Image: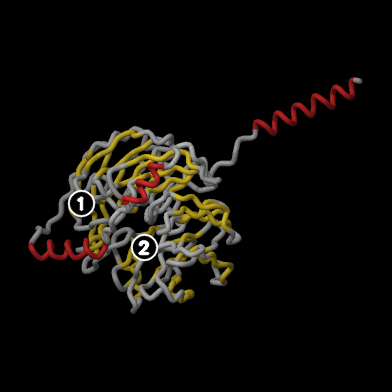
Amino acid sequence: MRAVISIGLVMILLMGAIYLIPERGSSAEATEGWFMFHGNAQHTGLSAYDASSNTGEICGKLQLVAPGVSAVIDSDGVIYMGGVLGFYAISEDGKILWKYEDVSVGDPAAIFKDTIYFEDMSSVYAVDKNGNLKWKYKIESGLAASLTVYDGRIYACSQNGTLYVLNENGEKVMEHSFKEDIMAPAVGLDGTVYIASNSTLYAMTPEGDFLWNYTPDNSSFGYPTPVVDGDTIYLGSDDGNLYAISSNGDLKWKFDAHSEIWSTPAIGNDGSIYFGTNSGRFFAVNRYGNELWNFSTGDDIVSSPAIDSKGNIFFGCDDGNLYSLDSSGNLRWKTNLGKMIRASPAIASNGNIYVTAHDGNLYCIGEGSFSGSYSWALCAGIVVVSVAIISYLVVKRKRSKKAVEEYDDEDDDEEYM
């Protein structure tokens, strides 16, 4: 009898232990620094830094003639970004530390170890932290997307649909022609490379061998940047769906947001996925594809969100506001910068947020002073170049009012499986 009771007690304890095991969260690594577009090579947009004390105050701004270019931040807090007139290193308080001349940079840089990588329209540059050139690699067909750097390899996409892979010495390791436009790849923690074209998501080994490809039915992705979280790859699309693809190339699920998704999704600590749409709605979806909540803004959301260590969310909007929501979708604050914000915000170690608006300014949001200065004066020629760059970087599409109306007419309690 005692044996039976003992066995029963053991079973109860085991069942209780199983019950108490927490649900798996995200396997995404939080980034200490903001080393490339969306923080890291997986493009998760997840920071290790706490920005919960940030109340949305504007510390200051620095005119770099850099409309829509996202900033990156190294582990020492130095900010790097390019503009029409050059590539800059900037201190946390807004001082220009150095400038690399004679380049026009329209995409985020990337940092690996003590080297900063950036590109103009035709070449990839590697400079040290003092701005000295290490090497330059020219790509005749021109460059078309932000750089991704992982494990000493630099991934660059050309305008003719070719992926170039360079090593830390600026030597070409391999190249692959996709014969259609491609966007910045994401690299999983195991080194698998994921890259999307308008029609297809590809996976390949670090050595360049293709593993699989996924093509949506009767639709197109619209040149998204993939995001990798463990064994799942997420990407938005022009058909209004957020796709979740397994690391084997199978469709796990898709979530219909009823509007184009140009915003690169971000991954929270619990594995939730956050993204904006061109209908002006910002969504949170769990890792099974079910909607958690949505938040409505006044205009398109092309900006890719950033998430701090406490789950606070930051993103820009075409209505000129930088928004901060908590993890439940409640508005913490919004700060108007006057011009639309399509860049991805970057989170610094002190909780400050750095983001550019389409007036060409780099803004510091948070605490402290940010009083940048530089010796050149604005002139008619700069204004002309600024307008040209804005026209090149920004293709403003009309929002689908029909999509918004259709969504509003739906049952709020509807579940998306």
Figure quadrant of residue 333: top left
Residue at horizontal 54 percent and vertical 57 percent from the top: 245
Q: Is residue 289 left or right of residue 123?
A: right
Say which residue appears at 31% left-offset and 35% top-offset.
54
Applied colour scheme = secondary structure
Outermost residue to the top: 2
Above-or-below relation of 292 to 117:
above
Residue tagged by mark 2? Answer: 146
Which quadrant, please, contains the N terminus?
A: top right
Q: Is residue 175 visible?
A: no
The answer for how far apart the CA atoms under marks 2 and 1 are is 20 Å
Three-letter code, disc 1: Asn
Q: Residue furthest left?
A: 380
Which residue carries the number 1 mark? 361
Q: Position of residue 246 (x, y in %)?
A: 58, 56
Query: Taking 213 as reference, is 102 left or right?
Result: left
Horizontal side of 231 relative to 69 (left or right) equals right
